[in-house]
Image (cartoon, rainbow, N blue to C red):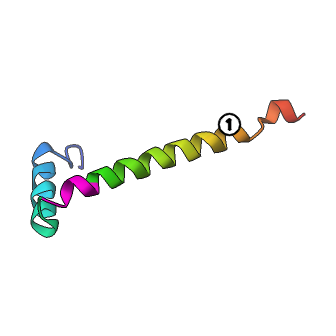
């Protein structure tokens, strides 16, 4: 039923709506901020993973 629910033209519509809402000048800043946030999230998740002891080593 939802086999092809997300197609490439959906991305074009989403991008067009974002450009209309926020303007083309703010889009690079928003993308840069999103990239920074993703890098921080990735590094924090890796730090948490490295910090937690495994079940086998605690026994």
Of 14 and 25, the residue lying toward us: 25
Against 54, residue 24 (above or below) is: below
Q: Position of residue 28 (x, y in %)?
A: 21, 52
Task: Name which quarter of the figure residue 17 lies in.
Answer: bottom left
Left or right: 33 as drawn, with respect to 44: left
Q: State how many labels appear.
A: 1
Against 49, residue 2 (above or below) is: below
Q: Position of residue 32 (x, y in %)?
A: 30, 50
User: Is residue 52 magenta-colored?
Assistant: no
Of 22 and 16, the residue lying toward us: 22
Q: Main secondary structure of the magenta part?
A: helix
Residue extending farthest bottom: 21
Q: Position of residue 13 (x, y in %)?
A: 10, 56
Task: Name which quarter of the figure residue 27 lies in.
Answer: bottom left
Left or right: 36 as drawn, with respect to 43: left
- For the C terminus, the quadrant is top right
Q: Which residue is rendered at x = 35% and y = 53% of the image? A: 34
Q: Position of residue 1 (x, y in %)?
A: 23, 49
Residue extending farthest top: 56
Left or right: 18 as drawn, with respect to 45: left
Residue linked to disc 1: 50
Of 34 and 59, the residue lying toward us: 34
Give the secondary structure at mark 1: helix
Q: Which residue is rendered at x = 13% and y = 43% of the image? A: 8
Mark 1: few/some/many CA within 10 Å (<14, 14-19, 20+): few
Left or right: 32 as drawn, with respect to 21: right
Q: Which residue is rendered at x = 87% and y = 35% of the image? A: 58
Task: Name which quarter of the figure residue 18 lies in.
Answer: bottom left
Q: Which residues are magenta?
A: 25-30
Residue extending farthest right: 59
Q: Which residue is rendered at x = 54% and y = 42% of the image? A: 43
């Amino acid at each position: 039923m939802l086999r092809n629910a997300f197609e490439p033209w959906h991305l074009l519509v989403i991008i067009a709506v974002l450009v209309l809402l926020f303007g083309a000048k703010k889009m690079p800043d928003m993308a840069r901020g999103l990239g920074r946030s993703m890098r921080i999230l990735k590094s924090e998740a890796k730090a948490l993973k490295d910090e937690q002891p495994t079940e086998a080593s605690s026994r």
